[in-house]
Image (cartoon, rainbow, N blue to C red):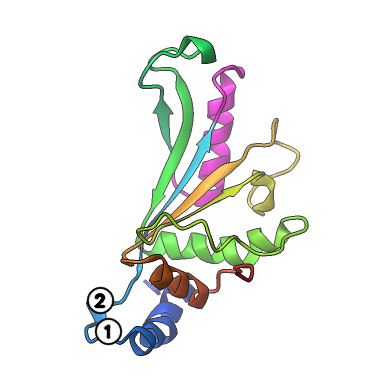
Amino acid sequence: MNKPRLQLHYETVVRPALMEKHGYRNLHQVPRLEKIVVHMGVSASLEKTAVEDAARDLAAITGRKPVVDRARKSVANFKLRRGLPIGCHVTLRRAVMYEFLDRLVATALPRIRDFRGLSPRAFDGRGSYSLGLEDQTIFPEIDLDKIKRHQGMDVTLVTTAATDAEAYDLLKLMGFPFAEK
């Protein structure tokens, strides 16, 4: 099986550049992407098919069957009962992760209206980066005629970087369109 384009780019360009910039001696010290988690939350007050529609869209976008998330506790103010489906998520690793990241950076993000770059301040302090997308229709896999509601999603990129600066350098070299600091 052939390696994805972005994975080859990481191995041939990004890893040597990071080794030179940060002075790593060992290949295993170089930060790398560990996994990508894509999550769609759905309001519990919507009709019952809302979670199924979100799961179908997420499966079309990622190519993997999503796991349905259920409420852990009942909250009366939100009209939420324990065990009620409230969203879905997919965890991507290895080749599928690189394919999704390539499609996200190359096709989906440029389709966002008035896009000026991703915020460089969305790191969590331990090298992971999270971004929120307001609409699933920026992905070309979604058929605009078949969607019932516009649904947002959260994308979290988990890296092995120890600091935010290392993770920023990794994602910048991988082609992430960050806005200027």
Where residue 1 sits in the image (x, y, percent)? 36, 71
Say if the magenta span includes residue 43: yes
Residue position marked by numbered label 1 in the rendering: 24
Q: Is mark 2 on a helix, strand or loop?
A: helix
Looking at the picture, does residue 37 appear above or below residue 168?
Answer: above
Judging depth in this view, the residue of 2 and 57 nearest the camera is 57
Looking at the picture, does residue 120 appear above or below residue 134?
Answer: below
Q: Residue 103 carries which label?
A: none
Q: Which residue is drawn at 51% across and 43% down?
A: 59
Which quarter of the rendered picture does the C terminus lie within? bottom right
Res. 4 visible in picture: no
Q: How crowded is mark 1: few (under 14 residues within 10 Å), some or many (20 or more)?
A: some
Where residue 43 sits in the image (x, y, percent)? 57, 24
Q: In this view, does 110 lie to the left or right of 31?
A: right
Q: Which of marks 1 and 2 is nearer the N terminus?
A: 1
Judging depth in this view, the residue of 47 and 164 nearest the camera is 164
Q: Are marks 1 and 2 in contact (CB under 8 Å)?
A: yes
**Alpha carbon distance from label 1 to label 2:** 6 Å
Where residue 101 sits in the image (x, y, percent)? 50, 63
Q: Give the range drawn in magenta.
A: 42-65
Looking at the picture, does residue 39 appear above or below residue 125?
Answer: above
Residue position marked by numbered label 2 in the rendering: 29
Q: What residue type is labelled 1?
A: Tyr
Q: What residue type is labelled 2?
A: Gln
Res. 170 visible in picture: yes
Residue 70: name its quadrant. Answer: top left
Q: Which residue is drawn at 61% across and 17% down?
A: 47
Q: Is mark 1 on a helix, strand or loop?
A: loop
Q: Is residue 105 left or right of residue 163?
A: right
Q: Residue at x 42, y 54 (%)?
A: 124
